[in-house]
Image: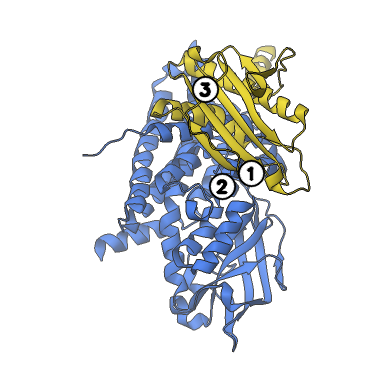
Amino acid sequence: MISFDLTEEQNALIETARRFTKERIIPVAAQCDRDSRFPMDVFKDAWKLGFVNPTLDAEYGGAGLSDLDSTFVTEELAYGCTGIQTSITANTLGLTPIRLAGTPEQKKKYLGWLSSEPIHCSYATTEPGAGSDVAGMRTKATKQSDGSYVLSGQKAWITNANFASFFTIFATENAELRHKGIGSFLVHRDAKGVSVGKHEDKLGQRASDTAVVTLDDVHVPAAQVLAPPGHGFKLAMETFNQTRPDIGAGALGLMRRCLDECVAYAKERKTFGQPISQHQLVQWMIAEMAIRIEATSLLVRKAAWNLDQGVRNPVVSSYAKAYGADSAMATAVDAVQVFGGNGYVKEYPVEKLMRDAKILQIYEGTSQIQRIVIAKNILG
Amino acid sequence: MCLLLLSSCAPPRDVVPESHDVQRTPSAGAEGGYEYVARRPLAVVAIAESRGLDHEVVTGIADRLANSLDVCATQLASEGRLVPAAARIAAHIDRAGTPTGLALTLTPGPGPTANALVCFVSPFKLLHFPAADVDPQSRGLAVEAAWGGSAIGVPTPSPTVPEPPR
């Protein structure tokens, strides 16, 4: 039988994350958005509470939370600010390939590093010329006689690039081979030839660091080869399968914030002699928000539950990500509409929510790519 | 025009964070074998043992934990979710001043666990101790806490209390 009850521990986890968001994220979110700045002190405290690498195995010093529990944490942090939440939780993207494909020595070194210090790691597949077309990447990996590799190329839109202590980088030994040529490599920030560009001045999620990473003949020792060429593409796709539910969870947090702000505003704001909450077309928008939230929640929890149970069904992760991202965008647009003119100015929080929501439809596989994945799954 | 200005100039809806000012307990001190006991209406925090830390730092930590535990317990009580219980945390303090290697003992049961995680363990994990370039094994703290209506008095945690890691 299906049970939707949460355990006491899960309720405690949610409450802890909610209090942290209220006390540490919400008070700084607007200013960090204006300044396009990530609050590192908030990150360090989130790390202390186990929110930064929630699924990192206890064996390597992590909190060892399930994927389902991770979505609860992400949702609560996203309620405060998806920009700050993205840069708090993005380590999961960088560490998941190591969990999936790392040698025992690599896991001990890199996962242990993440659990012993409040550091960032970044995941890098996207390039200026290859975003949705992951297999079209051109960053070159040239094998040396001793099993090491030399990497050259450029990665774009890399979250936390300016903070990362190491990168999980995907590169190809031969671009003509497309997905069959791709491998994965662990690159330290201080490796010779690694340079990081300026923090991008983005439309939304401005508190989250995003930058270009340039690799200029970077030497990667054999011990830092995570997946040899030919095995990297599958690793990248499985990583997305495991992290897409969290994007849905981020969308959930943003939508809940939209709804709460709209409900509060609609009860106060009066037009035609009554609160706008009494107008049916405002009620319609609020009801639609609530429906989207509940539906996204069910998809996200199902996708995360699948991962925890070892059920291999990546299309459900795509459902959660696609539906959650599109719902968040629609909800945020409606939130601005509910606020009317006040929704268009920075004194009220909803314009930021609309700007923040847009990237959910783009990163970790666009909404269009998710639909291609889903259609291929259905049509064969 | 004035009415329009008034209607469009409603204050922004920012969340005002709770005060983090620490209440000190002037009359508190050593009691019943504890180095320091800080009592609040619904909470009591006691320092069972400290190593390598200044007394003022330790008493400040106890007062801070007692304040946050009391605020949290009061909120839970208002929601009917407070379960009287006790807990003990022992931890080392690393060079950066972060508690590490936490050893936790709780009154058994899901209710106490949930209360403890939110009201005691999380605030403990967020504590900042002074940084010091010493062996982390040389700095440590064992703190006991109790909360709920029956918690007033020196806490009596479960029998097998772990010593701070040596």
Disc 1: which residue: A43
Residue in view at x 77 percent, y 32 percent: B54
Between label 3 and label 1, give the one nearer the viewer.
3
Residue B156 shows which numbered tag?
A: 3
Marks 2 and 3 in Cβ contact (< 8 Å): no
Q: Position of residue A41 (x, y in %)?
A: 69, 41
Quadrant position of the N terminus of chain B in the picture: top right
Residue in view at x 65 percent, y 12 percent: B3
Dot 2: element: loop
Q: State whether residue A139 is above or below residue A22.
A: below
Residue A200, image quadrant: bottom right
- Of residue B39 and residue A223, the one placed in the foreground of this image is B39
- Of residue B30 and residue A23, the one placed in the foreground of this image is B30
Residue A306 shows which numbered tag?
A: none
Q: Position of residue A38 (x, y in %)?
A: 67, 45
Tell me the distance, in whole angstroms, between the alpha carbons under discs 2 and 3: 34 Å
Marks 1 and 2 in Cβ contact (< 8 Å): yes
Residue A376 horizontal side relative to residue A109, left or right? left
- Of residue A19 and residue A240, the one placed in the foreground of this image is A19
Other residues around mark 1 within 10 Å, as few (<14) / some (14–19) / many (≥20): many
Quadrant position of the C terminus of chain B in the picture: top right
